[in-house]
Image (cartoon, rainbow, N blue to C red):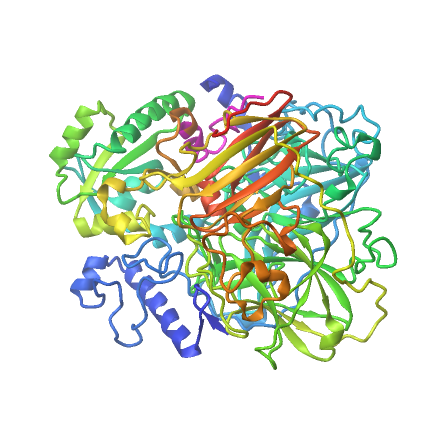
């Protein structure tokens, strides 16, 4: 893992990539709108706005400190985030993922000069009170102001779980909470970059993947042995 | 023509209901109502149906990505693309990429070692490559460096028209077109491609401007292969060296400059960015790559006398996409990690286009570019829907077969390819269609195995045989025509390895229980050795498994055409009356599966065995599921070819 100095050398002068397009004659030429399409459609949305409308309902959630937060406005907007699913009594995959995320957090703190927010969303909101989540965090040694454990109204949490693709397409599997998704979602909301990786993978690899959401502020490519 | 995403054709009124429901959902979501609010307001039932009221009767959460999603699962209910009138746009044929002088390259001259010098304009290295072009490039007479033929491409965004009924789409392209220009290469003539990443930060909602371009089925040195983790940043270039040499040229067949029976014909290039392949390919980063030699010449008066390129030899890239009903913009289902389907069929980047042809033989090169849909492509005569319309398949995965095989249809999993010869003389003055008749309810599991009747599937391309009669000097294909001989793989493999593709309990794809990482190889293949890989699909979804570097032969368990036997020719007798769903594991290949392939379709709970040699090149390569949604999350492993291999039988 190269250190912060190595990572950021020269980055300050880096222009926006869009400005790197070469000779003027190679600039894109806007295709004319076909006549039959004219006037039929609403103007295009920005990428982040399209994603917000499609995937990010602004439901109210409650943190383990009892604080009320809006999912989009308070947790996602303008932030780089990692999301996972858990529940307080989970003794299957949750401890592994939580432990991995702790290591990932440590690696990213050293490698990235941008705060990354971690959100662990319960999939048993009816059982997991803020206090139960606080206890889970304490047991797992998570004491981190940018890592929130979240609960909410069961129906809204369930909607969120489906919107974010944490639901299993097989209803039988989906009903078995112990088989809940072990995937992580990570994203850079303002740049509309969203990816997915496996929560049980090696923490070093997870950290590299999450770094994809931090353009040019992370090493360009994974550490592959040559 | 109106379709549901699962392939079912629907009436205009039904589609209008779907569209209305889509718009209503959008309005309701925009207004900030939650699902519970909707239930309380009596607008939504617990089953996910919008209550029948003023055109609200369509399923509220249905049909994009998952047929069974009842709770607003991501991807559900969002694909009712705007209506487009089919057959109003000519099928684009990508231009042939033209070489340039070495001195005309932008930036520093190519170097064997990566050019790590800092580009003052960007503050980062000129080149994104990290490894030198491997020996003997630059020291072998067949591998001059830089190559005599040099190209430059720029990956950039551009506005592209896909239908007269949709606004221009802001896609990511090679040189402004998608599919990108077709590379036409010759065996024995290495090429160097300077590949610039000039993609913008603004992705319009999906895509990552960090790329690695893979030449699919290329016998390519690792550092030029487009390995998923060899990506490069915006502002950088990556010099890719394609030797265009026959497999074995440095090893088993040195005296003949490689094994002619390993010649490749129809390849494609596409982005392979680790974790973002699906988004980047969906956004447009793909194109064709054709290889000719002294047998497959591109001239119908020489060699195998296959129809001449480019007049009568046409590459076709099949894809399905979804468009937003409100803005008309292409949409990607970012939070669906199971597989996605679109309801608009595209050929070479246009929705349901038209192709005008002469009444003569044509070679069509078909590629299924995905992302998740499997195809079974038929020729359909609208005036005689029940009559089989057989044609000749001459390649499997772009590699010429031992001889042409007459087929009623071609089945293509994602990334699978077929060259076919269709004689349009028999349709002179008529209009026919290419039709996908395969039933696939969602993007996850692949097809059900059943096919619909003629005219009831997705019509993808309208072919009008209205151009004047012209000479046809191409050979008449027949079962006695010979192309290449299938190389023997009957020698004892150095190692036999087993791979089980599965999910763990928590929805994470695994191969032999292990998860993906770029950072270390799962096993080492010994250079120039023969290996046998036994694939086991432990999951009840279909997976097209692709292996980099070398084509393989499926020795057992290759699936054939889907569907009933009613239109099967004798060539397909092995598949009998039903799709090979189980019990096909031990079948030996016949027909079009007596072939060299690079992607094997694993049907649910099924096995397949492949054999291949890993010759000439060293370094890291990938084996992965080519349902690119599965690939990204992360049904993939890295293996390395090394001078000394291991014998891990279950890596």
Q: Nearer the viewer, residue B336 or B128?
A: B336
Q: Left or right: A44 with respect to B134?
A: left
At 60% from the left and 35% from the top, the residue drawn is B235
* Residue B533 position within the rendered picture, expressed as x and y whole percent measured from the top left: 55, 36
Q: Is residue B494 above or below residue B80?
A: above
* Residue B129 position within the rendered picture, expressed as x and y whole percent measured from the top left: 63, 28
State the image quarter where residue B193 is shown.
Answer: top right
Q: Is residue B491 above or below residue B74?
A: above
Q: Nearer the viewer, residue B398 or B16?
A: B398
At 84% from the left and 59% from the top, the residue drawn is B300
- Residue A107 falls inside the magenta stretch: no
State the image quarter where residue B22 is shown.
Answer: bottom left
Q: In terms of secondary structure, what is the magenta stretch mainly? A: loop
At 60% from the left and 64% from the top, the residue drawn is B409
Q: Left or right: A181 with respect to B453?
A: left
* Residue B216 position within the rendered picture, expressed as x and y whole percent measured from the top left: 63, 43
Q: Left or right: B31 with respect to B498?
A: left
Is residue B323 visible in this depiction of the protein?
yes
Q: Is residue B187 above or below residue B55?
A: above
Q: Bounds of the magenta span?
A: A206-226
Is residue B124 visible in this depiction of the protein?
no
State the image quarter where residue B128 is shown.
Answer: top right
- Residue A212 falls inside the magenta stretch: yes
Single out the residue that lies furthest toward the bottom: B383
Q: Is residue A188 above or below residue B588?
A: above
* Residue A173 position within the rendered picture, expressed as x and y whole percent measured from the top left: 28, 48
User: Number of labelled discs?
Assistant: 0
């Amino acid at each position: 893992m190269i250190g912060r100095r190595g990572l950021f050398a020269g980055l300050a002068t880096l222009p926006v990539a869009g400005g790197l397009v070469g000779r003027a004659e190679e600039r894109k030429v806007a295709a004319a709108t076909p006549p039959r399409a004219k006037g039929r459609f609403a103007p295009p949305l920005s990428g982040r706005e399209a994603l917000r409308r499609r995937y990010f309902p602004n439901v109210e959630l409650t943190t383990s400190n009892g604080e009320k937060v809006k999912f989009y406005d308070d947790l996602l907007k303008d932030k780089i985030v990692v999301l996972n699913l858990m529940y307080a009594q989970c003794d299957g995959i949750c401890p592994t993922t939580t432990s991995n995320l702790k290591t990932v957090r440590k690696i990213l703190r050293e490698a990235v000069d941008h705060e990354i927010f971690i959100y662990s969303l319960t999939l048993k909101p009816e059982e997991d009170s803020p206090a139960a989540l606080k206890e889970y965090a304490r047991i797992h040694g998570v004491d981190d102001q940018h890592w929130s454990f979240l609960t909410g109204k069961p129906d809204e949490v369930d909607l969120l779980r489906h919107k974010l693709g944490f639901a299993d397409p097989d209803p039988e599997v989906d009903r078995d909470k112990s088989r809940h998704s072990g995937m992580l979602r990570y994203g850079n909301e303002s740049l509309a970059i969203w990816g997915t990786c496996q929560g049980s993978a090696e923490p070093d690899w997870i950290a590299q993947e999450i770094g994809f959401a931090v353009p040019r502020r992370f090493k360009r490519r994974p550490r592959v042995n040559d | 023509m109106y379709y549901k995403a699962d392939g079912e054709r629907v009436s205009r009124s039904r589609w209008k209901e779907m569209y209305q429901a889509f718009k209503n959902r959008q309005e309701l979501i925009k207004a900030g109502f939650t699902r519970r609010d909707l239930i309380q307001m009596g607008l939504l039932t617990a089953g996910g149906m919008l209550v029948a009221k003023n055109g609200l009767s369509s399923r509220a959460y249905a049909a994009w990505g998952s047929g069974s999603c009842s709770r607003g699962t991501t991807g559900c209910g969002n694909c009712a693309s705007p209506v487009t009138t089919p057959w109003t746009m000519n099928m684009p044929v990508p231009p042939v990429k033209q070489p340039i002088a070495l001195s005309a390259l932008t930036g520093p001259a190519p170097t064997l070692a990566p050019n790590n010098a800092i580009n003052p304009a960007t503050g980062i290295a000129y080149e994104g490559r990290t490894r030198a072009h491997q020996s003997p490039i630059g020291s072998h007479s067949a591998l001059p460096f830089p190559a005599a033929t040099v190209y430059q491409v720029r990956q950039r965004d551009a506005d592209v028209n896909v239908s007269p009924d949709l606004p221009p789409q802001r896609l990511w392209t090679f040189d402004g077109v998608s599919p990108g220009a077709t590379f036409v290469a010759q065996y024995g003539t290495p090429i160097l491609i300077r590949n610039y990443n000039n993609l913008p930060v603004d992705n319009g909602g999906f895509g990552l401007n960090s790329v690695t371009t893979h030449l699919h089925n290329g016998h390519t040195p690792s550092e030029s292969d487009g390995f998923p983790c060899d990506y490069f940043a915006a502002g950088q270039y990556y010099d890719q060296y394609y030797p265009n040499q026959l497999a074995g040229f440095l090893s088993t067949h040195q005296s003949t400059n490689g094994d002619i029976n390993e010649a490749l014909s129809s390849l494609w290039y596409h982005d392979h960015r680790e974790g973002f392949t699906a988004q980047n390919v969906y956004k447009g980063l793909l194109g064709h790559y054709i290889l000719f030699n002294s047998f497959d010449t591109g001239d119908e008066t020489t060699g195998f006398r296959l129809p001449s390129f480019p007049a009568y030899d046409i590459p076709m890239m099949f894809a399905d996409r979804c468009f937003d009903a409100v803005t008309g913009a292409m949409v990607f289902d970012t939070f669906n990690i199971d597989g996605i389907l679109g309801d608009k069929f595209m050929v070479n980047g246009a929705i349901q286009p038209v192709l005008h042809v002469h009444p003569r033989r044509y070679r069509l090169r078909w590629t299924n570019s995905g992302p998740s849909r499997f195809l079974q492509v038929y020729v359909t005569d609208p005036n005689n829907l029940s009559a089989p319309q057989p044609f000749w398949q001459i390649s499997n995965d772009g590699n010429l077969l031992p001889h042409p095989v007459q087929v009623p249809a071609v089945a293509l999993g994602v990334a699978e390819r077929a060259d076919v010869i269709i004689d349009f003389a028999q349709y002179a003055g008529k209009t026919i269609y290419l039709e996908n008749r395969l039933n696939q309810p969602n993007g996850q599991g692949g097809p059900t195995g059943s096919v619909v009747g003629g005219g009831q599937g997705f019509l993808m391309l309208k072919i009008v045989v209205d151009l004047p009669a012209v000479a046809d000097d191409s050979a008449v294909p027949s079962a006695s025509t010979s192309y290449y001989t299938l190389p023997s793989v009957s020698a004892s493999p150095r190692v036999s390895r087993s791979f089980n593709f599965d999910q763990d309990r928590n929805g994470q794809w695994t191969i032999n229980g292990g998860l993906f990482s770029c950072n270390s190889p799962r096993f080492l293949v010994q250079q120039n050795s023969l290996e046998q890989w036994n694939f086991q699909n432990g999951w009840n979804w279909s997976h097209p498994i692709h292996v980099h570097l070398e084509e393989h032969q499926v020795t057992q368990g290759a699936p054939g055409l889907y569907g009933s036997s009613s239109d099967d020719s004798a060539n397909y007798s092995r598949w009998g009356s039903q799709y090979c769903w189980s019990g096909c594991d031990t079948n030996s290949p016949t027909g079009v599966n007596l072939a060299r392939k690079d992607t094997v379709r694993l049907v649910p709970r099924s096995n397949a065995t492949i054999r291949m040699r890993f010759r000439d090149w060293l370094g890291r390569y990938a084996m992965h599921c080519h349902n690119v949604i599965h690939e990204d999350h992360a049904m993939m492993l890295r293996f390395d070819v090394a001078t000394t291999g291991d014998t891990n039988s279950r890596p």
